[in-house]
Amino acid sequence: MELEAYTQYHETKLHEQPGFAYNTYLCTIPDDFSSVNLHWHAQMEIIYIKKGEGTVSVNLRSFPVHAGDIVPVLPGELHQIEQRNGQRMEYENIIFSLELLDSTCEDDWCRANVLQKLLQGTLSFPRPIVPGTPFHAQVSRCLDAADDACSHRNPGYNLLVKSQLFLFLYALFQNQTASSRESLPPNDHTEKLKNVIRFVREHYSENISIADAAAISGYSEAHFMRIFKQESGQTFIHFLTEYRLTAATYLLRETNESVS
């Protein structure tokens, strides 16, 4: 498990197979960790709530989630997962690269009309996907079938997982909407905070000041501190400290590197 995955999921991995870019994590807040801090990555992520309730933020827009809710997170979207009202929440994280479903054909319809739109964030659909809707029935059926295939791992199960992912993308394509309210587009601060988080990832072992982070964001120090707290629910110093502590734990458990 690489550092970026460890900072988000710690030791909760449920499925992994080398050479097959589809991983699942079964997580519980607050048992496994108190929250998943603001982050982003190049893979597709699906947050599938199993029990309880919590809060999910996508592109700095927060909403409550409950058992059965499904939240697809597109590549590059800033997101976090938090406890809500002191409640316990069990959820499954499904992480996969869209390259798993890509084609080598230059004029491939799926690449142009679905995969590229997901990568660019231009394929919009309602989120969260809530139980009791045809959309939810389509999506949950695909994810449950993929989970079942992973649990049994019969020869060639990878083909079954990929087929369910194509059905999942078909459901997203069928239910796309032009409503910006439902599609959760980035707000004005999203890209600037992503740049700050990228900076932390690359330089967390060095001295990082509020002034450094503010300069990366393009805001004044006071404005940066206010925006970061407003959008993430924590101070930048707290975020940086938590990232460093998790990175140190990762280095001790997963590598032979020093944490000094």
Image (cartoon, rainbow, N blue to C red):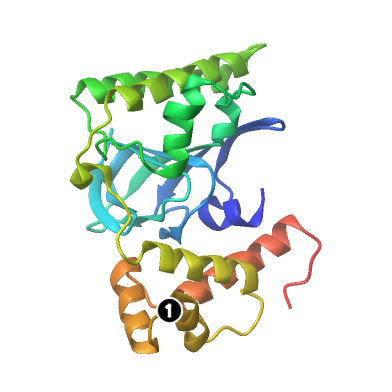
Residue type marked 1: Gly
Residue 252 left/right relative to 172: right
State the image coordinates of residue 255 (x, y, percent, origin top left). Answer: 77, 58
Residue 207 is drawn in which quadrant? Answer: bottom right
Please report the residue visible at 66 percent of the width from the left and 48 percent of the height from the top. Answer: 1
Please report the residue visible at 66 percent of the width from the left and 60 percent of the height from the top. Answer: 250
Nearer the observer, 140 or 115 = 115
Q: Residues within 10 Å of mark 1 (few under 14, many from 20)?
A: some
State the image coordinates of residue 136 (x, y, percent, origin top left). Answer: 27, 25
**Residue pushed farthest right?**
256
Please report the residue visible at 36 percent of the width from the left and 82 percent of the height from the top. Answer: 225
Residue 50 is drawn in which quadrant? Answer: top left
For label 1, the residue is: 218
In the displayed structure, 3 sits above or below 42; it is below
Please report the residue visible at 38 percent of the width from the left and 78 percent of the height from the top. Answer: 235
**Residue pushed farthest front?**
107
Nearer the observer, 11 or 134 = 134
